[in-house]
């Protein structure tokens, strides 16, 4: 086991850039925001600009901030693989008439939620001292499962040095290894550069049905929402990433949390270094995690588990506000800050909790930044959904594909790119428009030139 301490390591955030086909189709079962806003008109331009504003603001705070490109949508290769033939315009029209739900799926811009892109283990945790990536298979929904291959290709381009980075393809696309990426992965440590305890949160075990029930105590209740993350996925990733067994924990998410709309763990819990903020109904056995953390990281490690009681903030309100989908970041010279959505400020109970945390001298949170991410939030994705965390040593940071770091210049270029290529209104029916396909491909072709990514997409090959 590698025990090297990288005290100068930093935690970088790589946010997914919203794609030109961003729309509301209600595709994600168990995601209340997605279902509530289905068929409404979206604004892809505003969505992308909101995401870029967050990236620029975090970079301006002194954080290492990168960008991940959107994927090709509508995804014609998926349609052709299912037997649709002919010119692109004919295929789109045929699918529109034959299977409109399939058209919605292949047009989804859901790769914007980079927390689902992969699970990442830093070099301080791995036996070979390299950063390991496993791209998520996202097998629970067809609109997300088609992301896996391109995500793996993108990550391999951004983190290309085989001496520093290891890339594992998606796990087998089967229920026993259903994997939704870093949205169900937490890490506890004293410092991001030190060896930590990697926590894999899961919704079901190998013998469990895919669906979960609304009442933890009533196994005969009708299924209401899918448990997307399988314990087998976390077990496989821990082996792939060569993690020390004593520094791996598997924590079960409460079925009631999933039924309430916490389709991923990051809707009801967020961790950073030694701090874990969570709802009281987030997990089945949190005390076991506390015990394991003490054994794995030693008696000097004193984590703070801050539980929000239901009487302080109901599970429904936690899901509606996305309080726990906030990011916790280390702002240079200013301590830990919370990065939250505008919905947190608009919900009195959630905002009061944030103010209490900041005022509590026993907690490390020192400030808060609020962002308007409504275009993403209406589809069920907040600040933490949009980013993939990657802990990097200075050597590893220097090896990252440089054009994907957000700088003032790069931000300005991307804003200009969005304004030039994105529509300001879109309804699901527009996905059958061949002109939208041409617009999207033109935009992505220009983006790969801007970011120096080469022929990334199938239509470029």
Image (cartoon, rainbow, N blue to C red):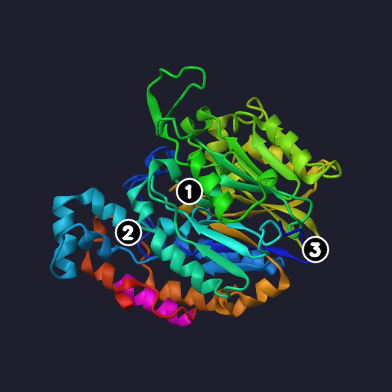
Residue 447 vs 28, above or below: the answer is below
Camera-side residue of 270 and 375: 270
Counting labels gives: 3
**Residues in magenta, as a range:** 439-450
Instruction: Pinpoint residue 77: horizontal percent, then vertical percent.
Output: 26, 65
Q: Is residue 350 above or below residue 42?
A: above
Q: CA distance from mark 2 to mark 3?
A: 47 Å
Residue 442 within the magenta-colored segment of the rendering = yes
Dominant SS in magenta: helix
- Spatial separation of the CA atoms under disc 3 and disc 1: 30 Å
**Residue wearing tag 2:** 426
Q: Is residue 201 left or right of residue 104?
A: right
Identify the residue position indicated by label 3 in the image: 7
Residue bearing mark 1? 180
> Is disc 2 surrounded by few (<14), some (14 to 19) or many (20+) residues within 10 Å?
many
Helix, strand or loop at label 3? It is: loop
What crowding class fits label 3: few (fewer than 14 Cα within 10 Å), some (14-19), or many (20 or more)?
A: few
Q: Quadrant of the N terminus?
A: bottom right
Cα gap from disc 2 to disc 1, whole angstroms: 27 Å
Q: Quadrant of residue 282?
A: top right
Relative horizontal placement of residue 80, taking residue 325 as reference (left or right): left
From the viewer's perspective, tell me whether residue 293 is left or right of residue 73: right
């Amino acid at each position: 086991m590698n025990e090297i301490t990288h005290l100068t390591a930093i935690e970088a955030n790589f946010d997914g850039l919203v794609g030109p086909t961003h729309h509301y189709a209600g595709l994600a079962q168990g995601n209340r925001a997605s279902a509530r806003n289905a068929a409404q008109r979206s604004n892809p331009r505003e969505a992308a600009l909101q995401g870029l504003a967050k990236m620029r603001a975090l970079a301006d705070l002194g954080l290492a901030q990168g960008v991940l490109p959107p994927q090709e949508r509508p995804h014609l290769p998926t349609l052709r693989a299912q037997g649709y033939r002919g010119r692109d315009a004919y295929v789109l029209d045929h699918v529109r008439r034959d299977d409109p739900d399939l058209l919605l799926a292949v047009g989804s811009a859901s790769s914007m939620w980079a927390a689902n892109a992969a699970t990442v283990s830093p070099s301080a945790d791995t036996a070979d001292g390299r950063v390991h990536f496993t791209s998520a298979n996202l097998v629970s929904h067809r609109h997300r499962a088609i992301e896996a291959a391109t995500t793996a290709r993108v990550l391999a381009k951004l983190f290309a040095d085989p001496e520093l980075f290891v890339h594992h393809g998606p796990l087998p696309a089967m229920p026993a290894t259903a994997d939704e990426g870093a949205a169900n992965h937490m890490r506890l440590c004293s410092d991001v550069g030190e060896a930590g305890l990697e926590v894999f949160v899961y919704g079901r075990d190998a013998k469990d049905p895919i669906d979960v029930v609304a009442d933890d105590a009533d196994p005969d209740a009708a299924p209401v929402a899918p448990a997307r993350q399988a314990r087998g996925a976390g077990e496989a990733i821990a082996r792939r990433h060569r993690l020390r067994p004593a520094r791996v924990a598997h924590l079960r998410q409460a079925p009631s949390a999933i039924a309430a709309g916490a389709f991923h763990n990051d809707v009801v819990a967020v961790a950073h270094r030694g701090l874990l903020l969570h709802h009281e109904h987030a997990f089945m056995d949190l005390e076991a995690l506390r015990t394991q953390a003490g054994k794995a990281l030693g008696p000097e490690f004193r984590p703070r588990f801050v539980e929000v009681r239901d009487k302080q903030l109901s599970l429904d309100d936690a899901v509606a506000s996305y309080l726990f989908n906030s990011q916790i970041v280390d702002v240079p010279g200013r301590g830990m800050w919370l990065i939250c959505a505008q919905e947190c400020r608009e919900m009195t109970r959630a905002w009061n909790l944030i103010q209490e945390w900041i005022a509590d001298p026993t907690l490390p949170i020192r400030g808060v930044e609020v962002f308007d991410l409504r275009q993403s939030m209406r589809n069920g994705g907040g600040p933490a959904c949009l980013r993939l965390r990657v802990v990097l040593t200075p050597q590893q940071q220097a090896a990252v594909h440089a054009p994907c770091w957000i700088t003032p210049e790069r931000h300005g270029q991307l804003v200009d790119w969005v304004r030039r290529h994105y529509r300001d209104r879109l309804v699901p029916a527009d996905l059958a428009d061949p002109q939208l396909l041409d617009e999207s491909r033109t935009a992505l072709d220009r983006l790969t030139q801007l970011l120096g990514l080469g022929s990334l997409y199938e239509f470029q090959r």
